[in-house]
């Protein structure tokens, strides 16, 4: 790129984005307010929902982010009633009586159980004190790779839960808005979402996704790969939360081990006997290879399809990672090495999408065009 065009790009980038991001959305420390006893609202309420494979988030225009908890629903199979949603439901795993069954209604980024999803949303509304009478207007994120059927199911689930109107926003657009990028301007902004069940890279300009690439895998697939390698190499089964802890503490996307290891409780597959196993970072890193290679390829595909002008913008402005899985050690460095561009992990990476949706609610009129045609 010649120096002339570089100057122009820098000039464009310094322009005040059309979408001004209020300071409160960029605050360093995020407090998720405790929900406390329901505060029943009968006035019209605008609600933002980011439901993911592992975690769901709810925010209202007036009260900010109220819920950030596991996407789990506990249902009493005798009465059919929802007992708990979120953290409370997760805590009841293995502790409650046999007729309480725990469901995870999302996989690979989208709903796999319409009825339980509707109950989840209804439970989240209850927790946030949003009455059915308020006939909430809901703004929800949807992965770009979701099919038309999955989108319709998500929308209908929210309506069944009591929403009056549902607007779907493609997750990369919500992420870019949450990051304060100038999504509506004629410049290219690159974001990559790394979640528990889905990953997607997108290049955004003039309010739309210009090029995008996605995979139906994410952080959960790393956990499964680590668990199966433990079974294969040590003949043991380890609790899911322990596997996740091994990933957080030992994994490195670049394969660094620093000689570290963790001793964990496990059970022998054959006998069921409890044992202690020392797990090294090298084993964890071997398990990551396949998913991480596929993720690099996904980002490369997205960037290689970009028109030259927008590619130059990305080379100058870099790419931002969002989503909880982006917190994997050395992930940004790995993608930077694989693409040759600067890569950063967003602050509060797992909350960027819900913040973007929150902005969509408050700036509904100016951003309305971004909600169209996402039901394809
Ligand atoms: N420090 C960390 N290191 C590695 N992985 C992490 C870390 N913190 C969270 N994760 C992973 O991030 C994932 C959860 O991210 P997130 O909450 O963004 O997913 P989600 O929105 O539920 O999923 P999706 O959008 O794909 O449906 C989990 O796989 C979790 O293990
Ligand atoms: Mg997500």
Image: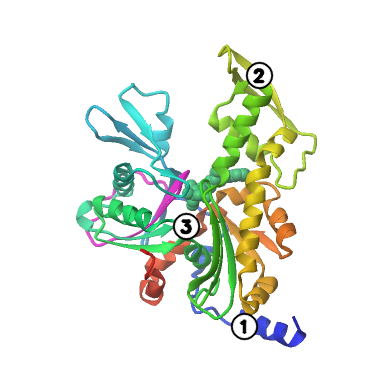
Q: Earlier in the sequence, mark 2 or mark 3?
A: 3
Is residue 103 shown left or right of residue 29? left
The x and y percentages for residue 98 are 33, 21
Which quarter of the figure has residue 306?
bottom right
Against 34, is 359 above or below?
below
Q: How crowded is the residue under tag 2: few (<14 C-alpha within 10 Å), some, or many (20+)?
A: few
Say the numbered circle drawn on residue 333.
none
Q: CA distance from mark 2 to mark 3?
A: 41 Å
Q: Earlier in the sequence, mark 1 or mark 3?
A: 1
**Label 1: how many residues lie within 10 Å, few (<14), some (14-19) or many (20+)?**
some
Residue 178, given in percent of the width and then of the height, sits at 50, 64
SS at mark 1 in the image: helix
Left or right, 60 with respect to 185, comes to left
Q: Residue furthest right?
A: 259
Residue that carries the numbered disc 3 in the rendered image: 145
Q: Is residue 99 left or right of residue 203?
A: left
**Quarter occupied by residue 318:** bottom right
Q: Quadrant of the N terminus?
A: bottom right
Specify the principal SS of the magenta part. loop
Magenta span includes 74? no
2, above or below 172, in the image: below
Where disc 2 sits, the SS reads strand
In the picture of the structure, the residue carrying the numbered disc 1 is 12
Give how far apart the Cα atoms at labels 1 and 2 are. Answer: 58 Å
On the image, the x and y values in percent for residue 16 come to 56, 80
Residue 132 visible in image:
yes
Q: Which residue is mark 2?
A: 276
The residues colored magenta run 33-58
């Amino acid at each position: 790129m010649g120096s002339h065009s570089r100057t122009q790009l820098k000039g464009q980038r310094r322009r005040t984005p059309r979408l001004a991001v209020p300071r409160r959305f960029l605050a360093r420390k995020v407090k998720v307010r405790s929900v406390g006893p329901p505060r029943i609202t009968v006035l019209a309420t605008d609600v933002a929902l980011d439901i993911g494979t592992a975690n769901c988030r709810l925010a209202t225009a007036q009260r900010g982010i109220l819920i950030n908890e596991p996407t789990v629903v506990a249902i009493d199979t005798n009465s059919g009633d929802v007992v708990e949603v979120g953290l409370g439901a997760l805590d009841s795993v293995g502790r409650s009586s046999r007729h309480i069954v725990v469901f995870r209604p999302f996989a690979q980024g989208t709903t796999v159980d319409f009825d339980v999803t509707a109950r989840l949303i209804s439970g989240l509304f209850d927790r946030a004190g949003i009455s059915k009478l308020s006939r909430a207007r809901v703004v929800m994120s949807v992965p770009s790779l979701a099919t038309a059927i999955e989108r319709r199911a998500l929308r209908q689930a929210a309506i069944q839960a009591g929403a009056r109107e549902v607007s779907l926003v493609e997750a990369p657009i919500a992420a870019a808005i949450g990051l304060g990028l100038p999504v509506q301007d004629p410049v290219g902004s690159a974001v990559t979402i790394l979640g528990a069940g889905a990953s997607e890279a997108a290049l955004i300009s003039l309010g739309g996704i210009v090029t995008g690439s996605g995979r139906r895998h994410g952080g959960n697939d790393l956990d499964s790969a680590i668990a199966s390698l433990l079974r294969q190499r040590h003949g043991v089964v380890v609790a899911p939360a322990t596997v996740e802890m091994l990933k957080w503490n030992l994994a490195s996307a670049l394969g660094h081990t620093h000689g570290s290891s963790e001793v964990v409780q496990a059970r022998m597959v054959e006998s069921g006997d409890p044992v202690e196993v020392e797990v090294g970072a090298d084993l964890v890193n071997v398990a990551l290879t396949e998913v991480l290679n596929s993720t690099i390829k996904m980002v490369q595909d997205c960037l290689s399809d970009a028109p030259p002008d927008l590619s130059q913008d990305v080379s100058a402005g870099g790419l931002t990672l969002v989503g909880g899985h982006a917190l994997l050690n050395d992930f940004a460095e790995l993608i930077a090495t694989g693409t040759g561009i600067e890569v950063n992990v967003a602050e509060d990476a797992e909350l960027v999408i819900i913040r973007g949706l929150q902005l969509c609610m408050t700036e509904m009129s100016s951003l309305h065009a971004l909600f169209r045609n996402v039901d394809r």
